[in-house]
């Protein structure tokens, strides 16, 4: 049952990526205040996420503020929100589809070919979901790096990559790898039966009897 084991491994990796994608979406630390440069006040640290921003004081006190208006948000935040939420939704659908198509489940057990196609579909949806998460996190990270190296950005207004970005990148890779395992396993799962041909007549037997 090596094929079933590969399917289970791919599903497990994708499911862990699904959990990580949810965690990355709700985390606040998408970008953190940078301490590079001179004359930086380190009494407080600022964090910004997709849903709220927080300020951490040196005394340990943390104050957070939820974004009030959706229309006032920068386009990068709105776009990343849409990509991450779409990724989470597609990954949830892929989990349901892949569960039906996996060999370790009893669904569609009487139709192995259809079961393989369902698992392949789940793997493809996993890959699409992972790509959406990868695009969203990479786009946001590219904007952080662009603003950081912009000479016109004030030193005390520069941000660096937050922990949520690393979690999102890792989750996206897990989802894509898990979906790839499902797709590779199903593509090689064709039936091993050789086609049947009608028995050939021997050369010594005449087709017709003559009187």
Image: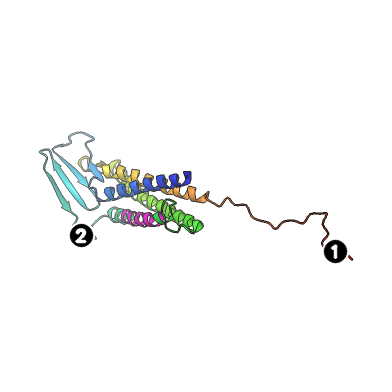
Q: Is residue 166 left or right of residue 101?
A: left
Label 2: how many residues lie within 10 Å, few (<14), some (14-19) or many (20+)?
A: few
Q: Is residue 182 left or right of residue 67?
A: right
Q: CA distance from mark 1 to mark 2?
A: 94 Å
**Residue 53 coordinates in the image, percent (x, y):** 19, 49
Q: Main SS of the magenta segment?
A: helix
**Residue 41 coordinates in the image, percent (x, y):** 15, 37
Observer-nearest of 171 and 56: 171
User: Image point 43% across, 52% down: which residue?
Assistant: 102
Q: Is residue 113 left or right of residue 157?
A: right
Contact between marks 1 and 2 (CB within 8 A): the answer is no
Q: Which residues are magenta?
A: 84-98
Label 1 SS: loop
> Circle 2 is placed at which residue position?
69
What is the total number of numbered labels drawn onto the structure image? 2
> Circle 1 is placed at which residue position?
209
Query: Looking at the image, is mark 1 or mark 2 earlier in the sequence?
Result: 2
């Amino acid at each position: 049952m090596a094929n079933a084991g590969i399917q289970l491994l791919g599903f497990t990796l994708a499911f862990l990526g699904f959990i990580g994608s949810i965690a990355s979406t709700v985390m606040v630390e998408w970008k953190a205040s940078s301490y590079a440069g001179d004359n930086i006040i380190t009494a407080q640290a600022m964090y910004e996420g997709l849903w709220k921003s927080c300020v951490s004081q040196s005394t340990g006190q943390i104050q957070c503020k939820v974004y009030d208006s959706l229309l006032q948000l920068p386009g990068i935040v709105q776009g990343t929100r849409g990509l991450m939420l779409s990724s989470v939704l597609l990954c949830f659908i892929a989990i349901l589809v892949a569960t039906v198509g996996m060999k370790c489940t009893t669904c569609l057990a009487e139709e192995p070919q259809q079961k393989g196609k369902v698992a392949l579909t789940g793997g493809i949806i996993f890959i699409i979901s992972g790509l959406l998460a990868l695009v969203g996190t990479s786009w946001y990270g590219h904007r952080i790096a662009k603003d950081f190296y912009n000479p016109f950005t004030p030193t005390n207004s520069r941000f660096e990559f937050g922990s949520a970005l690393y979690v999102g990148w890792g989750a996206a890779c897990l989802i894509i790898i898990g979906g790839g395992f499902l797709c590779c396993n199903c593509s090689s799962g064709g039936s091993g039966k050789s086609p049947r041909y009608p028995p050939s007549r021997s050369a010594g037997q005449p087709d017709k009897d003559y009187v």
